[in-house]
Image (cartoon, rainbow, N blue to C red):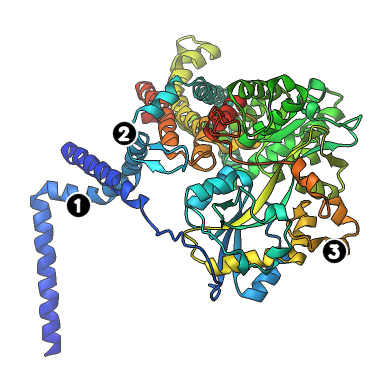
Amino acid sequence: MRRIRRGHVLIAALAAALCVPASGVSSAADNSMITKIGKGEGKLNLIAWEGYTQPQWVKPFTKATGCKVSAKYGGSSDEMVTLMRTGQYDAVSASGDASLRLILGKDVRGVDPKLVPDFKNFISALKSPSHNTVKGVHYGISLQWGPNTLLYNTKKVKPAPTSWGVLYSSKYKGKITVPDNAIQIADAALYLSKTKPGLGIKDPYELNSAQFKATVDLLKKQKPLVKKYWATAGDEIDLFKNGSATIGASWPYQTNTLIAAKAPVKDLIPKEGATGWADTWMISSKAKHPNCAMQWIKWVSTPKVQAQQAIYFGETPANTKACKIMDQLSKGSCAQYHANASSAYFNSIKFWKTPVKACGNGKNDCMDYTKWQQAWTDIKS
Amino acid sequence: MTSQAYEAGGRSLTTARRRLSAALWRRPWLRAIALLLPPLGWMVVFYLAALAVLFVSAFWSIDSFTGKLTHVWTWTNFDTVFTDKTYREIAWRTIWMAAAVTVTDAVIAFPFAYFMARVAGPRLRTLLFVLVLLPRWSSSLARIYAWRLILNQDGALNWSLAKLGLPEQGWAFTNTAMWIVFSYIWLPFMILPVYAALERIPDSYLEASRDLGARNWTTLRRVILPLALPGIVAGSIFTFSLTLGDYITPSLVGNVDFIGNVIYRNVLGLTNNLPFAAAYATVPLIVMGIYLVIAKRLGAFEAL
C-alpha cells in the first residue's frame, strides 16, 4: 500500500505541475480598437470604485439598453488591476495609477472617442490625458476627477486644521486614520515638498532614493499615531461614526455619506495642496460584452449621469454640460464640486499616477511602484 | 418467451456478480484498492496536488512591469521570505499571537471542560454543550464585527466601564483586540477535545489517588493533568493552526499584518504576485509540520 501511495502522489504532483502553465494561456485577448457599437449582449460586468454604480443611474441604463449590470467594488488601484487581469470583467473605472499599467500590460482595448457624443463637451485636459491616451490611441474615456481630502470631526478637532501636518503630529495620536494603500506615500511626499523644500521634491510620484527615504521615515513615524489603516471607504465611515477616529485622509464620498448620516464632520484641501484621482472607464481586451460596455461609457458620459455621480460621490465631472444639471439637482453643487473651476484648479491637484523608474528628472533613478509597495508593507509592519 | 429471456439475463447478471465477489475474495489486494482508491484519489487530486502546485509556483516569479507570470526557476521568493526583516517580523508576530491564543484558550477551557465532564449533571452538561456550540452556528464574520462594536471607542465595553466608574479602554484595532477576538472564536475548538480527554478518566483512578493519601491538588497535578494533556495538545493544534492561517480577524479588528494578510495582498492587490504568496504560504506549513510532530509525541492524536 505504501508504494502505491507514493507513486500516486508523485504522478499527481507532476500532472498538476504540468497543468498550471497550460491554464496560464486561457481565454483569447482582443486588442483591436473599438470603432462601432453593435447589438448589446444583455449583460455587463464592471469593476468600479464604491459609489460609482448607484441604482439611480444603473437602473435607467438597464432599462434603456437591456444590459444587466453586475458590479464589483475595487478597494484600491492594485486590486482593480489584478481583477481586470482575471479576464472576467468587461470594464473598469481605473484611476491614473492603474490605467497606464493596464495599457502597458495589454489588458484594455482602444476606443474611438467618436462613439461617445458627449466627448466634445469634456474639459480639454481630460480629452487625451497622458494616463489614458498613448501614442494617440484612447484606451478608454475619462469620467470624473477630484482631490483626496482631509476629513475631521468638527466637535473633537479644534482648532480646524489647515495643514496635512495634523496627520503627522502627536496631537491626535490614536485618532488618525489613513488609507491602507501604497499610493499614500505620495501624500507624505507632497507634504514634505512644501515643508522640507531642501529635499527638492517636485512631483510626489517621482522620488529619488534620498527623497523616498525621507518620505518613508515620515510615514514610519506616523504609524504609532494611526488608529487604523482603512481598507474600504465603508471602513473609514465606520471609524468616524463610532468615534474611533476623529481625523484622517479621505475621499469626498466619505464626507458626503457621513454628513448624510448627521455626523459632525467637515473636509478640506489643506494649504499644501492635495493628491487626487482622474478616473477612466476602460474596456477589457477579454471583454465578453464589449457592446454593453461601450453603451455604458456612452451613458455615464451624458450630462445627467455625470451630474448625478458628481453629487453622489462628491467629485468633479469631466463633462462641462453637467454643471447646469448639478445646480438643478442640488443648488450650488456645481461650484461646490468645482465643475466650473478654471484649469488652474485642475493643475493644482497632483493626480495619482504609477511611479516609474524613468521619471521626469531624466536620470532614471526614481523609485518604481514595486519599491513603493515593498516600502508600504515595511511601514505598516 | 420474453419472461425466459428476462430470466436468462437475470441469471447471467447473478453469475457475473458471483464471479466478481469470488475474485475479490481471492485477491485481498484488489479489494483494498477498490475500497481505498476513491477516497485516496480525492485526497491526492484535490488536496496534495493543490499543495504541490502551491509549492511549484513558489519557484516562479512575476515580471515587475506587466505583472505577468514568468516560468523560470528561482530561489528569490524564498530568499526574500527568510532574509527580509519585514516578512520575518510578520511571521514571528503571527506565531506569537497563535501561541498566546493557544495558552489563553487552554487556561480558560480546562476548568470549563472539567466542570462539564466531572461536575455537571447530564441536563446541565447538555445545556453547556449547546452554549459552547451555539455561537458557531452564526457566521464568524458577524461575530468578529460584533466584537468591533464591543471594543469601539463608543462601544458596549466603554459604555459599561463608564457606568461602573472605571477608566475607558482603547483596545480597538490593537493587538490586544486581536488576542481577545482570536481567543473567543477558537475557544470551542479547545473545550471539546479537553472535555473528551477528561471524561475518559475512570473514577477509580481518582479514588485510588485519594486512597493513597493524595490531596485534591496533588491528584489534579499528578493524575488529571497528565491524562488531560493529550486533549489539551489536540485542542491546541486547532487554536494554533487556525490563528496562524487567519487573515480576516487581523484586517477587521487589528491594524497590523499577519502572514495571511501578506498572502492575501499578494494574491489580490499588490501586483498579483502569486509566486511570492506561495513561498510565504510555506512558512505556516513548515511551522504546523513541526507543531504536529511535537503534538504526536505528546499523544495528541490518540485523544482526537
- Is residue A363 or residue A293 the one in the foreground? A363
The residue at which mark 1 appears reads as B34
Helix, strand or loop status at disc 1:
helix
| Between marks 3 and 2 in the image, the one whose residue lies nearer the viewer | 3
- Is residue B198 or residue A291 the one in the foreground? A291
For mark 2, name the chain. B
Label disc, if present, on residue A324 of the rendered structure:
3
For mark 3, name the chain. A
Going by the picture, which residue comes out furthest to the top?
B213
First in sequence, mark 1 or 2: give its number.
Answer: 1
Q: Give coordinates of residue A162: x percent, y percent.
A: 86, 32
- Picture mark count: 3
Mark yes or no: residue B225 visible.
Answer: yes
For mark 1, name the chain. B
Height in image: A101 above or below A70? above
Going by the picture, which residue comes out furthest to the front?
A362
Question: Do the numbered discs 1 and 2 sit on residues whose CB atoms are within 8 Å?
Answer: no
Mark yes or no: residue B172 visible.
Answer: no
| Between marks 1 and 3 in the image, the one whose residue lies nearer the viewer | 3
Label disc, if present, on residue B73 of the rendered structure:
2
Height in image: A254 above or below A170? below
Q: What amino acid does circle 2 point to?
A: Trp
Taking the spot 70% from the left edge, 64% from the top edge, the residue there is A120
Lateral position of residue A206 relative to residue B304, left or right = right
